[in-house]
Structure formats: C-alpha cells, structure tokens
Amino acid sequence: MGISLQRSVLSQWPLLALLALLWGCAALPVPVPDLDAFIQRRAACDHARGEFPDPPDPQRVREVVMQVAKYCTGTDAQLAALKNHYRFDAAVSHRLAAFEPQIEKTVK
C-alpha cells in the first residue's frame, strides 16, 4: 500500500510543478520603477495644479507656478513614452490610461 501511494504521488509531479509555476505567475505584480517614478511625479504635478489660490495672491501664485513648472514640465512626453514602451503590458497600460494625456498645454 505504501509503494502504490508513492507511485501515485510521483506520477502527479508534472501537474504539481505546473501548478507551482502558475502560482508564481499569479503573484503580485512586479514593480515598474519608471512607472512608479512617473506616478509619484505626476501626483506632485496634479497637486500643484490644484493649488492656485482663489482669490489670487500674487506671492502664492508665483510659488504654485514654480511648483507646476518643476513637477509638470515634460510629463506629457514622459506619459506618451511610457504608453508606447508598455503598450503590450495590459496592467501597466491600464494604470497609464488614468492620466490626462496633455496637461502641459492647459498649464501654460
């Protein structure tokens, strides 16, 4: 009885190996450093874009304009490049689709 149980388990090893491989593929997504850096920069940009004072305070407006220039300049091109680079990665493409493609033209 012990030998037949061993044979039964041993005959299932290819299935167990396949399941282990599939489990590894279903793990958490691997961080994408350039994507994560873009998302952080774009969050700072979006925050700065929402900081324009109402009513306008000239000093605060100058500060916000400097923040917008610092964090937003180049993000349109960076977003387009990331979308092109990760066009075949559905998970990354989905994350990038959440961003407005042309914010710099509305800022200037």
Image (cartoon, rainbow, N blue to C red):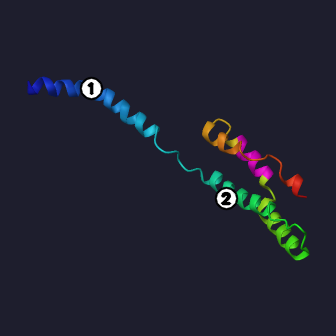
* Residue type beneath disc 1: Gln
* Residue type beneath disc 2: Gln
For the view shown, which residue lies furthest in the front direction?
Answer: 55
Q: CA distance from mark 1 to mark 2?
A: 47 Å
Q: Main secondary structure of the magenta part?
A: helix
Which residue does the image show at 63% across and 42% down from the upper left? Answer: 92
For the view shown, which residue lies furthest in the bottom direction?
Answer: 59
Which segment is the magenta one?
Answer: 76-84
Q: Residues within 10 Å of mark 2 (few under 14, many from 20)?
A: few
Numbered tag placed on residue 48 in the rendering? none
Query: Residue 39 in magenta?
Result: no
50 and 20: which is toward the camera: 50
Residue 1 percent location from the top left of the image? 8, 24
Foreground label between 1 and 2 = 2
Residue 78 percent location from the top left of the image? 75, 51
Which residue does the image show at 65% across and 44% down from the upper left? Answer: 95
Numbered tag placed on residue 12 in the rendering? 1
Q: Residues within 10 Å of mark 1 (few under 14, many from 20)?
A: few
Which residue does the image show at 81% across and 60% down from the upper left? Answer: 49
Q: Which residue is mark 2?
A: 40
In the rendered structure, which disc, 1 or 2, sits on the residue that comes first in sequence? Answer: 1
